[in-house]
Image (cartoon, rainbow, N blue to C red):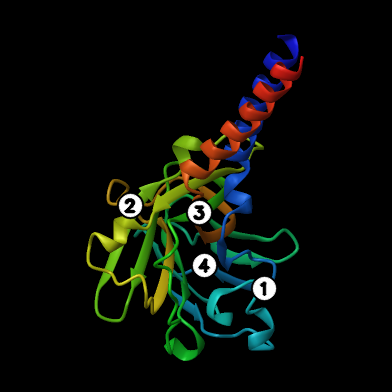
Amino acid sequence: MRSFKTLASAALLSTAAIAFAAPSSALTVVIDDFSDAAQSITRTSAGTTTLLDNLPGGGAFCSSIIGCYRDMATTSTVHPGMPARAVEAMVDTSTGTFVHSQEAGVIAQTRLTWDGLAGAGLGADLSLLDQFVLEVVSSDLSIEWELTVDDGTTSYTHEFLASSFTITGVNFQVELPLSIWSSKGVDLSSVKSISLLANGAQKGFPNGLPSVDTEIAFFAVTQVPEPAMLALFGLGLLGLGAAARRKA
């Protein structure tokens, strides 16, 4: 009896372990892991700075950046009467992160766009995948994020907040089902572009947010394993336990 209980418990624990490990073992399409093609923008006055397809080597980064190229654009506005304030945005390849940082009194946002060389389009088929996964290192003061998917005909932007999940020193994942976009008519079998906006210019803060620092480490699209497969594996282990009980 003890042997059966031990194996049964092991079966349940193994099934749970697989459930927690599933995202890493599931089919994953990397949008950007920020390990290649460093980019940096610093602004101390109103205006926009855009870096387009400025990646040396281009195709060398196809494994870590979807479509091989990444655009980055930062827009800032200094509230009238305020002294010059800085906003910085960068892809830091030494840490593998994207960072948006702004001082108090700045109204700013940074958009990352993946749309191939010179906006030619990704032509990506995401129809067999299930969710976007964003690994967030920090996202303070309720900075708003916007994720836009465009198929060339239909585009939809989903807004979300990540800061409520922040735990100091611990990365966390934001998971967004692709059904959010397909339900709005976006053709996921032929995605032209994907863009992610770190928005430090929220409507509720007309004079600019207090100082903001936000950082992400990984952006991908994943396929979630079928629950039935996890259940079958667990039942298989339970069957082994029953067989061991009969032999005992």
- Which numbered mark, 1 or 3, is in the foreground of this view? 3
According to the image, label 1 marks what residue?
A: 38
Image quadrant where residue 155 sits: bottom left
Give the secondary structure at mark 3.
strand
- Which numbered mark, 4 or 3, is in the foreground of this view? 3
Q: Earlier in the sequence, mark 1 or mark 3?
A: 1
Judge whether 37 appears above or below 215 on screen: below
- Closer to the camera in the image, 106 or 95: 95
According to the image, label 2 marks what residue?
A: 202
Please provide percent x and percent y for residue 7: 70, 22
**Whole-number angstrom distance, CA of label 4 to CA of label 3:** 32 Å
Residue kind at label 1, given as amino acid type: Ala
Please provide percent x and percent y for residue 130: 43, 56
- Closer to the camera in the image, 208 or 93: 93
**Whole-number angstrom distance, CA of label 1 to CA of label 3:** 22 Å
According to the image, label 3 marks what residue?
A: 133
**Whole-number angstrom distance, CA of label 2 to CA of label 3:** 23 Å
- Whether the residues at callouts 4 and 1 have beta carbons within 8 Å, the answer is no
Label 3 CA crowd tier, 10 Å (few <14, some 14–19, many 20+): many
According to the image, label 4 marks what residue?
A: 44
Residue kind at label 2, given as amino acid type: Gln
Please provide percent x and percent y for residue 98: 59, 61
Residue kind at label 4, given as amino acid type: Thr
- Tell me which residue sits at (66%, 20%) in the image: 9
- Which numbered mark, 4 or 1, is in the foreground of this view? 1
Quarter of the image containing the N terminus?
A: top right
Answer with left or right where residue 218 lies relative to residue 196. Answer: right
Judge whether 8 appears above or below 66 on screen: above
Label 1 CA crowd tier, 10 Å (few <14, some 14–19, many 20+): some
* Mark identifier at residue 154: none
Q: Residue furthest top?
A: 1
